[in-house]
Amino acid sequence: MDPERTTVADLLSSIAAKAPTPGGGAVAALTAALGAALGRMVLAYSEGRKSLAEHADLHARVRPALETLQSRVVELAEADAVAYARLNELWRLDEDDPRRREEFQDAVRGAIAVPQEILGAGLELLDLARDLCGASNKMLASDLAMTAVLAEAAVRCAAWNVRINTPQLADRAEATRLEHGVDEALTHAAKTCAQIEAACR
């Protein structure tokens, strides 16, 4: 699947198919991508307006950040499919298989690392959306609020993909640390999203 070279209908059919990928990881990443794209639209209608001239430096900083974030999460949709495919392949092997014993923990960490990155991108998107509160076209306040909602949704989706894999880690201290980090991220995301929505009302 190449999310940038397929129709929406094709993408939805791929996600709906009885196949392990694309699945939840791709959905989490593309949710963040949609949020970033919507944030870019808000910015496009804000840059160059006389009433927002004082925020020109902010706009100049946010624009490339949103562009980079959008590109990155689209790449992460593919990376998640690759990481999960590797884990799924090893999962199918007998538990005593030498290759599974040697590679399984590394594959689990790989399947956790990608959604962690998506989660981080969602948090970054929330911060960028918050920066645009009061510094963007008021006529697009609903779009800015939706940017935040999509960003929080991406964080929550990615959190599930981290949590579903942490029980497979042999190092329980590592698993606990990761789960605690997810809890903190979810709390921060919810708080930031609520702040943005309140500011957009």
Image (cartoon, rainbow, N blue to C red):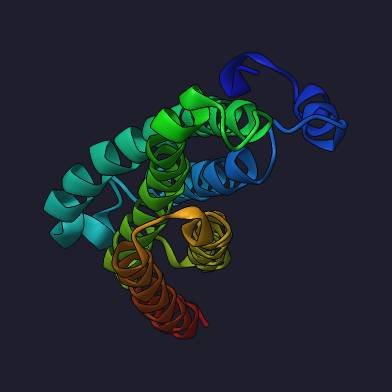
Residue 198 vertical position relative to residue 38 in the rendered view, above or below: below
Report if residue 144 is visible in the image: no
Rendered position, 176 above or below 171:
below
Residue 169 at x, y percent in the picture: 43, 55
Q: Assign the N terminus to one quadrant of the image.
A: top right
Q: Residue at x 69, y 39 (%)?
A: 23
Residues 165 and 120: in front is 165
Query: Where does the image place residue 196, in percent across and percent down from the top left?
Result: 42, 76
Q: Nearer the viewer, residue 99 or 131?
A: 99
Comparing 19 with 46, the one in front is 19
Point out residue 134 in the picture as x, y percentages from the top left corner: 31, 72
Q: Does residue 151 appear left or right of residue 67 in this picture? A: right
> Would you place residue 72 above or below residue 167 in this image?
above
Residue 111 seen from this side: yes
Across the whole image, how many numbered discs are drawn on residues? 0
Q: Quadrant of residue 9?
A: top right
Furthest residue to the front? 96
Q: Residue at x 63, y 32 (%)?
A: 88
Residue visible at 65% across and 28% down?
Answer: 93
Q: Nearer the viewer, residue 99 or 143?
A: 99
Furthest residue to the top?
5
Residue visible at 86% across and 31% down in the picture: 17
x and y percent of residue 165 in the render?
Answer: 53, 54
Rendering quarter of residue 178:
bottom left
